[in-house]
Image (cartoon, rainbow, N blue to C red):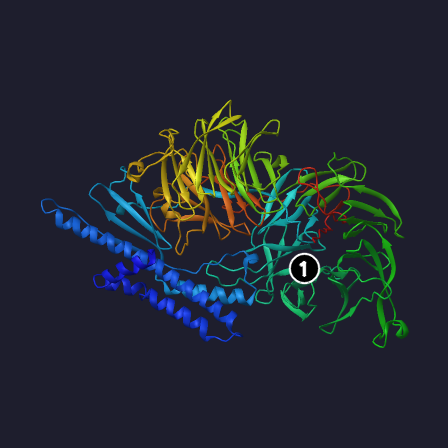
Amino acid sequence: MELDIGYHWLSLFSTIFKNDLTACGSILSPDLLSWSVCTDDVSGSSAEYPDRVFMMEGRLQAQEDEIMLLKSSLADALRRLRLHDHVCVCVCGTLHINPLMLPIHSLSRARRNSEKLVKDPQEKTKKLLDKKAASSSCLTLFFTLSHWLTGQSIKMFIRGRPITMYVPSNIQNYEDLRMEPPVEKLELDWVYGYRGRDCRANLYLLSSGEAVYFIACVVVLYHINNRTQRHYRKHTDCVRCLTIHPDKVRVASGQTAGVDKDGKPLQPYVHIWDSSTLITLQQIGLGTFERGVGSVAFSFADAGAFLCVIDDSNEHMLSVWDCAKGTKHTEVKSTNEAVFAVEFNPSDSTNIITCGKSHIYFWTLSAGSLTKKQGIFGKYKKPKFIQCFVFSLTGDVLTGDSEGNILTWGKSPGDVKTLGKGAKGNTFQIMRQTRAHDGSVFTLCMLQGGALLSGGGKDRKIIRWSADLAPERECEVKDAYVNGEELLVGTTRNAILRGTFSDGFVAIVQGHVDEMWGLATHPSQDVFLTCGHDRQVCVWNTAEHKLDWCTTLEEYGLCADFCPNGAVVSVGLSTGRWLVLDLQTKEVISDYTDGNEQLSVMRYSPDGSFLAVGSHDNFIYVYNVTECGRRYSRYGKCNGHSSFITHLDWSKDGKYIMSNSGDYEILYWDVAGGCKLLRNRYESKDREWASYTCVLGFHVMGVWLEGSDGTDINALCRSHSERVVAVADDFCKVHLFQYPCPKPKAPNHSYEGHGSHVTNVRFTHCDSHLLSMGGKDTCILQWEVKRAGTSDGGDRLHSASFTSYIHGKTMSMGGGTAHVGRGKDRVIERQKGETFLQSGE
């Protein structure tokens, strides 16, 4: 019925506003639409039926987009008629009417995160149809400024839906407002987290005493003794692999491909950079690699003259590069199966080994070309995965596989009787099989003197083996104190542990292992809380840069807020439940349920007497809070939104709520008057808000960039000083705007570092720092807020290199801790400056 009425009115007004309507698209008859659909259904043969249905869905989507745009034109036409009526009535007075259209052209914006690239052909076709439908619309977001008799209002359209916002009384002339970029800037202070769940060869120890690892788009250099960080931030997308040069100073890091804001693919590459100065020395392979860089390795026998790279293309191209010149020496197709690791033979740079799914290949570099021989399993069962390998002191190759075995490989003459007629010359065969772990062997490391370390997954053990592969010692990873000779351990639960065989291990770096959404900062302390899909609730200390404590919930958390007294925190879950946690005892003191859909926002009133709970069932539940946040009783329910609640804020007097919803509504509620909807939104234009996290509102209208579709901004937060507003967008960026920001195309500072959509941002209690949280990248970035002239480093840190050393041995493996839960384990050890391997499933 709504569509029929819309078409009727559009036909009526088409003659009056023909130019406006024809600019947006032609008018389709509902009868014609029904007829064409029916014709398509009966005219196609049974063999073409799925394809024709798919095409009809695309056409239907295009027509729906066109209808939405026409509705927007109808709303604008009605507005102009009302203005015309006002002009006719006001014969005794003077009325100034100044309609101003500020067009913002539609852009097809694609997320930069490479994990969201479309690979399925049908999905790709559907994306093209959607893009074509979008291009048929002339606008997706535009602003209209109108002067009314009683004041000013701004109308903003997102996806054809009008959003009316009233100009506050203290702004006399909106058109004369000038927007400037904020004086404040951000400088990356700390990176929380470690990417261990799906990457290998990603933990090393430099001669400076720094552990080097990566997460999101940042390579972190963490000085273990001094507890300081430096950051290499020249990558444009998620870092996937890492290795260090034999000189223990140079580092090579490879990244994934991704796409830019306009949907154009970004090319992956490898950077060779100096770890002491953080200066990029070479950019390798730009325009050569596909999808991303999976593995990298320096040669050792020739002092690191060559770099071997395997990309993420279907053929997993293996290429060898001259490090000094940055030129490609040779390239060859590797395999269509997954490749997990690549290494040069430490004593012969012409020999390269790769391993992965059901294979191990021995490559020979000769006369500028690569030839391979496959390892022969013979009488031994072929494992599903060869996870890792090392070179023994005798020249043999030891591999760890998914069956829990350590296989010893050696070169021997081909036996035609055993191996068939294809066996020519020397072959690489299994000389010995050693049972090592229950479950996969994720990592191996050869120690000085010939001893070997192995790390298991299922059994969470580190085992030390003698040179003849006799077990000597073993240790299960658990929380413990550290003394004596030490190891570093990287885990698939995104943690780095430090410990010994005798004393066990303790986490020095921790992080979430799944997508995060909930973020809250303490009202008076340097503390913040995070929660996400891994069901972990973590409380962090911004001053000491560490995890204070963590607890595991039955369901995953999506939102949280601290009570103003700082004693308790409320966490909203995915099922409609919400919990109240005591920060001292770390126990759940209250458990409530509102509806059966996920909760999206929790917000205490400024004095802590009320708690508002925003749900995906379209309601805001309001509770009375007593006994210092320990007792809650239902006060009322705000009912009026036609879509799920996304954001809400309290007024400074604690009597009113402003809320946003998934269909871009801005509503105001009188909580003191019984949670009543305020029909006259004009009355709320001068109301002051205790916080500002709503993404839609007059004061933050300028944060919406060109081509925004309404979901591109996930969160924003105004500073407590009310000077700036930080924005988290869907394109891996954090923005800093001046507050208030009421005009479109407002200038801002933009910061990169995340490798996925940024889900939330929050300022600390004193505005000294800003916290930003990634989604799939599981990364938390802590930014220091700098005023102009107080920092010489801009938004990148280039602090002096560190000279202290870590004594003793180091290693990396997978495994959980008491804080982050049990995970699958992997191990490796080498001397200072050598690699710490970390493998993922």
Residue 291, how many percent across, how many down?
Answer: 59, 63
Residue 792, how many percent across, how many down?
Answer: 50, 43
Residue 788 visible in the current orientation: no
Left or right relative to 357: residue 549: left
Residue 437 visible in the current orientation: yes
Give the residue drawn at x 59%, y 59%.
256
Q: Nearer the viewer, residue 511 or 551?
A: 551
Left or right relative to 840: residue 141: left
| Extreme residue in the left direction | 92
Asked if 554 appears above or below 316 in the picture, the reply is above
Asked if 540 appears above or below 834 in the picture, the reply is above
| Extreme residue in the top direction | 627
Residue 825, how many percent across, how many down?
Answer: 74, 47
Quadrant position of residue 802: top right
Quadrant position of residue 555: top right
Asked if 750 appears above or below 768 in the picture, the reply is below
> Circle 1 is placed at which residue position?
295
Residue 302, how many percent across, how many down?
Answer: 74, 62
Q: Quadrant of the C terminus?
A: bottom right
Badge 1: few (under 14), some or many (20 or more) residues near its Cα, within 10 Å? Answer: many
Q: Nearer the viewer, residue 440 or 743?
A: 440
Could you tell me which secondary element the residue under label 1 belongs to?
A: strand
Q: Quadrant of the N terminus?
A: bottom left
Q: Name which residue type carries label 1.
A: Ser
